[in-house]
Image: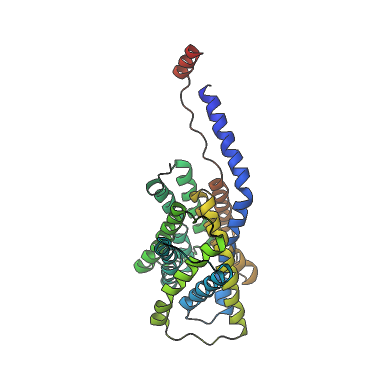
Amino acid sequence: MTSSGTERLSAGAGAGAFHANLPRTALTALAPLSWGTTYVVTTELLPEGHPLFAGLLRALPAGLVALAITRTLPRGAWWGKAAALGVLNIGLFFPLLFAAAERLPGGVAATLGAVQPLVVAVLAATVLREGTSGWRIGWGVIGVLGVGLVVIGPDAALDAVGIAAGLGGAATMALGVTLTKRWGRPAGVSPTAFAGWQLSAGGLFLTPVTLLVEGPPPAIDPPAALGYLWLGLVGGLAAYVLWFRGVTALPVTSVAVLGLLSPLVAALLGAVLLGQTLGPVELLGFGLSLAAIVAGQLPAPARRRPAGPRLVAEGAVR
């Protein structure tokens, strides 16, 4: 078979995998879509000054509900693995995310978070031994640029601690996603139970941190109760079940780039519900980000190699 024939077969296999993964990719995308509602729910429904408490209620009750439904606990080494994944994906990620949001304009914090697919691409090459490519890196950079155009305003200010927290949050969740892919999900354990382990571990880690930083919980009125219920059931339990199911079944770099949907949804809801404007620059950023998300699901184009000497050799074999 010629080199070009091999490339056509490889491209065909990649296209077939893309179409086969499309339904699961769409379901996985629902997780960052729901996380994009966190900003408007927090600002419009929840009491001010308690972001860690919101993260705690997003994680711990959802994790305990999942454990009660599935009645499945980790076994053996999975106690340690589940704890590590829960701390990385949730317990450490939430405080770093909120620290960045407090010290930086929301747009800058969101753009730093959008670096996560690039970190995942590097970790996939080093931890998972997956080959990386200029295609993945290039579209990852375009995605960060697109999110920046959408959410960074003209008077954005920078803060060293906030930048460190934003990058730390992106790196923490990127490592959690990569290790989730490396370790997989134990045989016979449902996605709901797997998410429940991590949500519970992350919530238990957040409990003392929240009490030390924010003190007693705030008073909860009906709108706040509705907001916490949304964050816990939709942004917590349902979203993380879909997210971890996707991480264990899909290419990790493809899943990571879906995270760009979160700041885009937040900006779109801000425009629709809060009267925030989206001008030509923001719309351009939307287009670039969506293009990066789509490209992240496609197989990288096959690199064409010189065919002359190979064809001669293959002709001699035939």
Q: In this orientation, which residue lies closer to the viewer: 15 or 168?
A: 15
Residue in view at x 51 percent, y 13 percent: 318
Residue in view at x 54 percent, y 33 percent: 10
Can you say whether 159 is above or below 285 in the image?
below
Q: In this orientation, which residue lies closer to the viewer: 283 or 211?
A: 211
x and y percentages locating residue 190 in the rendered image? 56, 60
Residue 115 appears in the picture as rendered: no
Residue 46 appears in the picture as rendered: yes
Residue in view at x 57 percent, y 53 percent: 284
Colouring: rainbow
Question: Which residue is at the far top?
Answer: 316
Q: In this orientation, which residue lies closer to the viewer: 151 or 223?
A: 223
Residue in view at x 46 percent, y 69 percent: 105
x and y percentages locating residue 144 in the rendered image? 48, 54
x and y percentages locating residue 98 in the rendered image? 44, 71
Q: Is residue 245 left or right of residue 127?
A: right
Can you say whether 312 is above or below 213 in the image?
above
Can you say whether 71 is above or below 140 in the image?
below
Question: Which residue is at the far left?
Answer: 160
x and y percentages locating residue 172 in the rendered image? 40, 61
Counting labels gives 0
